[in-house]
Image (cartoon, coloured by chain):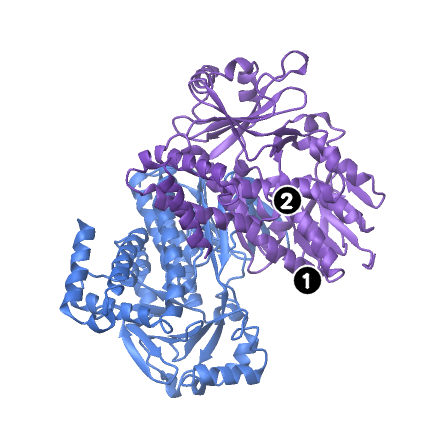
Chain colours: A purple, B blue
Amino acid sequence: MTQSKKEVGIIGSGLVGSLLSVYLAQRGWNINVYERRPDMRKVSGLAGRSINLALSDRGWKALREVGIEHKIKDIAIPMYGRYIHTQDGNSQFIPYGKKDQAIYSVSRSGINMALMDAAETYSNVKLHFDTRCTGIDLKTYTVELENEHHQKKTIQPDLVFGSDGAFSAIRLSQQTSTDRFDYQQFYIDCGYKELHIPAGPNNSFLIEKNALHIWPRGKYMMIALPNNDGSFTCTLFFPFEGEKSFAALNSKEKVQAFFEAEFSDAVPLMPSLLHDFFTNPTSSLVTVKCYPWVYQDKMAMIGDAAHAIVPFFGQGMNCGFEDCSVLNSLIDTYKDDWKTILSTYQALRKPDGDAIADLAIANFIEMRDLVSNPVFQLQKKIEAHMSTKYPDVWIPAYSLVTFSPHIRYSEALQRGQKQEQIMKKVMQIPQIETLYEGEEIELYILNEIKAETN
Amino acid sequence: MTQSKKEVGIIGSGLVGSLLSVYLAQRGWNINVYERRPDMRKVSGLAGRSINLALSDRGWKALREVGIEHKIKDIAIPMYGRYIHTQDGNSQFIPYGKKDQAIYSVSRSGINMALMDAAETYSNVKLHFDTRCTGIDLKTYTVELENEHHQKKTIQPDLVFGSDGAFSAIRLSQQTSTDRFDYQQFYIDCGYKELHIPAGPNNSFLIEKNALHIWPRGKYMMIALPNNDGSFTCTLFFPFEGEKSFAALNSKEKVQAFFEAEFSDAVPLMPSLLHDFFTNPTSSLVTVKCYPWVYQDKMAMIGDAAHAIVPFFGQGMNCGFEDCSVLNSLIDTYKDDWKTILSTYQALRKPDGDAIADLAIANFIEMRDLVSNPVFQLQKKIEAHMSTKYPDVWIPAYSLVTFSPHIRYSEALQRGQKQEQIMKKVMQIPQIETLYEGEEIELYILNEIKAETN
């Protein structure tokens, strides 16, 4: 180790903060992690919330790098495709990619606890719970902390990482105390609510285990991800206001009638539907963009603190893990030159954070349109045909993002936009609705790709 | 007066807060205005800063409504056009509009003090200086205040108006304590610095008094607005970083050489240039957009707190004054129904605030391109010709914004965009650079306008 020993403060022991602490612990530095919540491994109510996430190749790459891939594999369930449930009660399985390509269902608390356990195997990592960061003084790089008894203290580590999530206190300090901090937070008009499909007898899965279930319905949708105990965590994405909305479903009768009409095949599997609907919170979905992410050679934001995104590409956690991986490789390259490490981290990751935020919003819109727009459905059919027949030439943006961790998000976005431009031309070909299976269309698309590449 | 008497708290006694207090005082309500700064009428340093603003028709309309137009006319200097200073030392006067159409140079502190004086003519208005708002509790509508000795107190008026500027504490409370608050702040890559041209003998004006002087230079520019004492307040808009930038001009020699090369005709008029350049601050230029602006029937943001914009359309103050005018007319219409008053205020003004923010950014880009892009220069020449020959058919966006207070900003933006689309087609006509003065082009444009209107 040619690097000098560092005192590192990490704000937030969520998914990204915990993983980052493992990465940096392996360099022998002293790592203190400050988390405003109690230790979720000791508080049953917190760990019990079964929010599910989809872990994909970018996330696995980071877990592999720190040597804990196998621990997470034990608690992850592969999902090889989407299982689409139509309104009439039929269903259809659509693979995500090639054979064996999968995304993995993990519970947020499960993977977070595994990461905390991994961090604590290092004697040079200390997790401090019930310790809220109230801000950072960027003139002196002093982090202000407060415990659950409102006792304050300050720390001045060599390096500070703000992994304190979408509502980051570190970021708010930058917004309120520095000049020329660009900041944006915006919400989509849909919120979400967690619901539940319990396990069958002997922890059996009552619907296909190895799939991400989707009930797409235009302006709203429900999804379900498998848990290890045989249950599924469902999420209803639904408008806050309007004719069909959280605001409108204000009685048990209305909820029951709505679900029976829209998700008829799921209702018999959801015995606690009405209880869950009126007990579980309705949560909002924010996108956060900001700049700068780093301060000189002392401070960087990472994960949701730098780039909170909506969940419709399943990349929030994966993007945060990739932040850690990129940062780690830059530390390898630039050793003790933290000014260069942090500015390069920002230069690389800011465009990628923006790209995945935009892709996630676009996917939200696409998921809504998928069921309601016949032209768009035809377009997707043609694209699927192309990627099956020419898998190395026509790679959908979803595959680039999910299964191609060597391709940057920003490049995936650009390539997706080029494909979209080609498809716009294709969809304007007269009588495309009858011609679309012919070889002429294939040739047309292949020529367009060739023209783009030259 | 059919309305019940209200206790009103206004946060900030800047231009908009002071004007609003006058509007509301005329209804007989009790108005308390809380201002974090000391009283600028008593602190020489504050009033002495000679930032200048351009008051135009929307601002005058509001001042007329509260009956203080004449007081402001006394301290305002009409500017009938732009006085363009080219790099070779030549100059050209370009009228803003028709004969007698002018915008008016006023000093920020001068108009602010006049508005405070006007407010204090009402016994039911009280201005509280050195009283900082630290936030608002939106559950109880309790405003938290702190005086210069850090003594805290709270107030609970019937109505709260946040007129506390681009870095509003009222807005920050919404951002940090409410769900689904959309917020954006972004900076352009140029900052500004105030400079000075003193008066000549006997308070004479050394350059044309009744004009807004511009030295456009592509990536940067200087402007100068007249003051009543014969002096001019100059503002240099200049990149923060780069080859020619605030960062690069780091010695007296470099500043002197730069100004002599770029603003040769101005340098002899600026004896304190080097002192001013290194003494006056370099300030940044922010745009702020947010939503919602109002809370139920109790709170509204107004002026820069709701919509800070860059100064390149000269509309920041005018837009804030128009906010007050619109709000006032809604109080006339809806009497005591504050839920409707505030939601209608927001529904009307949010799109207009967004529109003038976008127009101001577009003007920043236009001002830069004006001198460097020959195609764009030709386009502007054609537009100027059209608006001179057909003044009722082709009204430039600048005139719609500046001299047409009956047309909403959002409509001005839309009409400007339509004109821009027409001009894009015109500029693609083969050999337009030789044909542009011919009647065919005129006819083409008139036909396009007709087609748009149908």
Give the chain letter at badge 2: A
Amino acid type assigned to the residue bearing label 2 in the image: Gly
Q: Quadrant of residue A76?
A: top right
Residue A241 in the image: x percent, y percent? 42, 31
N-terminal label among 2 and 1: 2
Q: Which quadrant of the rendered structure holds the N terminus of chain B?
A: top left
Residue positioned 36% across, 80% down in the render: B85
Question: In this picture, is A372 found above or below A427?
Answer: above
Quick one: A398 or A381, which is closer to the camera? A381
Q: Spatial distance from mark 2 to mark 1, Cα to Cα?
A: 20 Å
- Is residue B219 rendered to the left or right of residue A208? left
Circle 2: element type? helix
Q: Chain of mark 1?
A: A
Whether residue B426 is visible here, answered yes or no, is yes
| Mark 1, secondary structure of its residue | helix
Count the marks: how many?
Answer: 2
Give the residue drawn at x 54%, y 33%.
A96
Please, which residue is most extreme toward the front here? A439
Q: Is residue A395 above or below residue B115?
A: above
Write the residue at 21% across / 66% down: B387
Residue A340 numbered mark, or none: 1
Image position of A212 (left or right of B119): right
| Percent coordinates x, y for residue B218 in the rendering | 41, 73
Q: Nearer the viewer, residue B231 or B417?
A: B417
In the rendered image, residue A377, in percent from the top left (x then y), is placed at 39, 33
List the residue tagged with mark 2.
Answer: A320
Q: Is residue A54 above or below residue A168?
A: above
Asked if badge 2 and badge 1 are on a common chain, one would say yes
Residue B106 seen in this snapshot: no
Within 10 angstroms of label 2, few (less than 14), some, or many (20 or more) residues?
many
